[in-house]
Amino acid sequence: MDYGIAIFLTDETIGPADLARLVEERGFRSLFVPEHTHIPADRATPYDRGEELPRHYWRCLDPFVTLAAAAAATTKLRLGTGVCLLIQRDPITTAKEVSTLDFLSNGRVEFGIGAGWNKEEIENHGTPFERRFGVLRERMQAMQAIWTNDEASFHGNHVNFDRITSWPKPVQKPYPPVLLGGDGPTVLDRVMTYADGWLPNIEDDLAARVAELHRRTHEAGIARKRVTYFGADRDAGAVERLTAAGVDEIQFSLPSADAGTVEKTLDEVAALRI
């Protein structure tokens, strides 16, 4: 079992370089950070589940700037997005950002992506909410084309360009692992189509779905897809459940807090590893 850390880093928390050093020193495999470009003001509280949206949602740092700082402070730590909201981003620009980070970190990027849940946030970027999954697929496939071809073209319903060149290419070949977030009924179909692994964050039916994913890859004659659980509870019970479910990596959720609080919590979750 591998272990990692998931955390919302903000302008009010421990800094990414300091945190990354602490995470690597304690032998964790990875550090994953989420993304929200903004939160529409009338959606900050309450949100879909009638709860107040935590403050860190609208104060989180840009993931790629954050991970660049983490990369400069470490040598082995895997650096991930959990998740990059690709439907809110230009795929050509994002391909450049990811490949640059992979180049500068000597091949340590894991690219977690997702469609997101905040309708207003998504539509502020020009993506109709009901089309988000189609947009996500095309933007990801367009990026994969850019990463793997000296001259790339892509023609779809949502992404369209012809004969472009973009460097650097990622250090990892053919490109950094693409981990698809989400827990909906068709998420495994999307994982099978254009991702290298699954990044769930809900435990419901997890063991059955992990088994289904491995069955489908076996039947398709393709490589086994890695399952990384994002944002695990900080207790032994969660470790036991997720281990039994067959995930490959457990990423503990750390609080968005000051350096002292985060370091103390980091030591506590380090003791949970089995």
Image: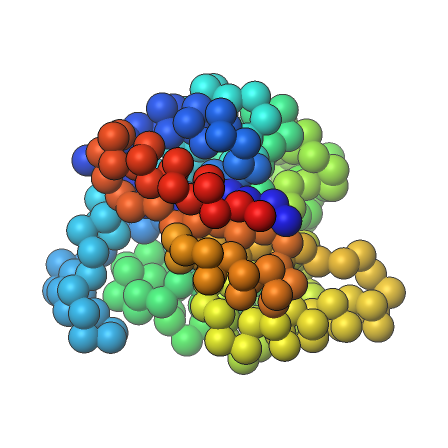
Q: Residue at x 53, y 52 (%)?
A: 250
Task: Tell me residue 125's x, y (percent).
Answer: 33, 56
Q: Is residue 124 visible?
A: yes
Q: Residue at x 45, y 20 (%)?
A: 73
> Residue 159's quadrant in the figure?
bottom right
Task: Tell me residue 197's x, y (percent).
Answer: 64, 57
Task: Tell me residue 258's x, y (percent).
Answer: 22, 34
Q: Residue at x 74, y 67 (%)?
A: 214
Task: Tell me residue 95's x, y (percent).
Answer: 55, 40
Residue 185 against residue 168 in the figure, above or below: below
In the picture provided, is 126 more to the left or to the right than 203?
Answer: left
In the picture provided, is 272 more to the left or to the right than 163?
Answer: left
In the picture provided, is 127 more to the left or to the right than 186?
Answer: left
The residue nearer to you, when weighing 10 against 260, is: 260
The residue nearer to you, when weighing 213 against 87, is: 213
In the picture provided, is 37 more to the left or to the right than 156?
Answer: left
> Residue 141's quadrant in the figure?
bottom right
> Residue 196's quadrant in the figure?
bottom right
Residue 225 against residue 148 in the figure, above or below: below
